[in-house]
Image (cartoon, rainbow, N blue to C red):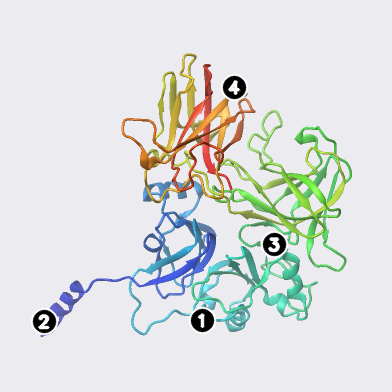
Amino acid sequence: MRLLIQRVLLQLAVALPLVCAAASVDVVKGWNMLGNSESLALDVTTGLNDPNTVLTVWSWNRTASKWAFYTPSMTPVELADYAQRKGYDVLSHIASKEGYWVNTIKAGTLTVATEEPPQVGTSSLPLSESDLLAGWNLAAFADGKTPAQLNAALSPSLKVAQKSILTLWAWDAAAARWKFYSPVLAAQGGTVLSNYLTSKSYAAFENPIGVSEGFWVNVLSGATVTTTSTSTTSIVPTTSTTSTTTTSTTLPPGTMAIFSETPAPTVLGFNGDTSTIESESTGSTNQVLKIVQTTTAAGLTAGNIAGTNVTLNQAIPLSMTNRSITLRVKAAAAGTYPVMLRLANDTRDASGADPKAIQSAVVSTATTADWQNVTFIFDRYFDSTTYNKLTVFFNYNVAGTNTFYIDDMKLATTTPALASFDEGDLAIYQLSSYGSGITSTSRVNDPQNSANKVAQVSLVATADDWASTVFYNIGNIPSVPNLLTANSQTVKLFVYSSKLAVKVRLKLEDASTYVPGSYSSSRIIEADATTTKVNSWENLTFNFSSSAGYNAAYKYNKATVSFNYGNIAPATFYFENLTPAP
């Protein structure tokens, strides 16, 4: 009888399929901080594998203090290779009670699945002391508590374990703004917490935490947090082992400096900038960078223009989707000022230059006496370089004096570049040339950085003046983004030319109308740009808004470039990073 029962149970187990449980989550375009409040792990390769919606997924390995990464646009082999080169883990699952980031291409609803159906009668468990390690924890739970209630519930067990919660953070995706709560500041009563929120432009993190919401918890270990006054309590997150140990600040993810941290960034003004870190106003606990500019001279090179160096306590984690930096700034006197940002790692070559320093475009900022955010985009960066030094130039290349203030420095999301050639996906790039006297090669070494891969085009003296290279040829694949949108008909291409004033023609096509055996389609638009540098990288902008034949209903997903168009001369060109302009 026992054997018969075992056989029946085995047959039932085989006959009953394993159906994954699923949960739906609404997301906005861009960054969303979500959480797994289920009792089982979420499978990212099942629920977050739609390349039409999901760009990247990230979770935080709190034990190793490193990121785990997943993108549906890469094969498993490509993903493993990319993660290894970047120092990431490959993300496959989100554990129970863990939070995660999802960067989306568009707003919509995601359906994420657990590995197996939850058992009858089980439910998600709220966070406990054992779930929180010292430092940063990207967490989730389904108990419906507010941050204040969560802290109150966990405080007794945390105290026994000699731990305490310093801060809690959540991301308001719709407003693109941090929500913040600190039990340390809340315990001081009055307007201490609200004043800090105002000084940092944070929203109050006070509502019950949603079932699909992720959040950061910064935990202090080995010491009890003093909550009697701001003079004995650090307003920003700090870690310490004993009361006699110097504290050091752990900043929120994506934040590079707030100038209230310990130790503070090192600042140094030059060529007319006098730079100090001081209180925002009399009696304020918020520290800011103050730059008093006494003189600038127009027409000088960047190295001789007044500026301020800021050496950070940690590296700036640049990536293809995070190549922008936002500064919170204001000026004593309102006006419009050109501002430029430069990043470096302070490693010099034999000539004393920093060959891997990068700089943003000059941004004309209408600065007032009120705080505002100014964003700087970096067209490219070097993978193998650790950027930890930032230089800001107010009144760039113009004469003028003023006093400027900078508070938060943060990374911002950037439109990812296409055809970067870093991944070597020839199924996408399909680099090929037509016309005589031209050769095209993908994935050669960058002439300025051997660690970076780019495409190369060489023209001989007898090359056709229309010789062209097809480098982005996706075909009619629905997951491929349109290079142009109703809001922007401009794209950029990073180009390195061996000659000055070279005409470059960029042709975009709707590949769904491609005619086999022909290099054309019935839906073609063209735009031209001219190089302004020799043996140096520059971002060329191609505006198709006035191109004959442009139609917003078409999907432009094929790109062809023609160097030295209309002329016959030998030359060598390099290019990468085809990027839809914002």
Q: Which mark is residue 143?
A: 1
Asked if residue 268 is positioned above or below residue 515 in the image, the reply reads: below
2 or 1: tag closer to the N-terminus: 2
Q: Residue at x 41, y 76 (%)?
A: 39
Q: Alpha carbon of mark 4 to alpha carbon of mark 2: how far?
A: 84 Å
Q: Give whichever of 260, 321 is nearer the camera.
A: 321
The residue to which callout 3 is attached is 248
Dividing the image into 4 quarters, which one contains the N terminus?
bottom left
Whether label 4 touches label 3, CB < 8 Å: no
Measuring from the top left, give residue 84's x and y in whole percent. Answer: 46, 48
Q: Residue at x 27, y 71 (%)?
A: 18
Left/right of residue 4 with respect to residue 181 in the rendered view: left
Measuring from the top left, give residue 154's x and y in whole percent. Answer: 58, 81
The residue to which callout 2 is attached is 4
Q: Residue at x 40, y 51 (%)?
A: 479
1 or 4: tag closer to the N-terminus: 1
Asked if residue 170 is positioned above or below residue 545 in the image, the reply reads: below
Tag in front: 4 or 2: 4
Q: Alpha carbon of mark 1 to alpha carbon of mark 4: how far?
A: 64 Å
Left/right of residue 41 with respect to residue 333 in the rendered view: left
The residue to which callout 4 is attached is 499
Measuring from the top left, give residue 60's x and y in whole percent. Answer: 52, 62
Q: Residues within 10 Å of mark 3 (few under 14, many from 20)?
A: some
Left/right of residue 305 with respect to residue 11 in the rendered view: right
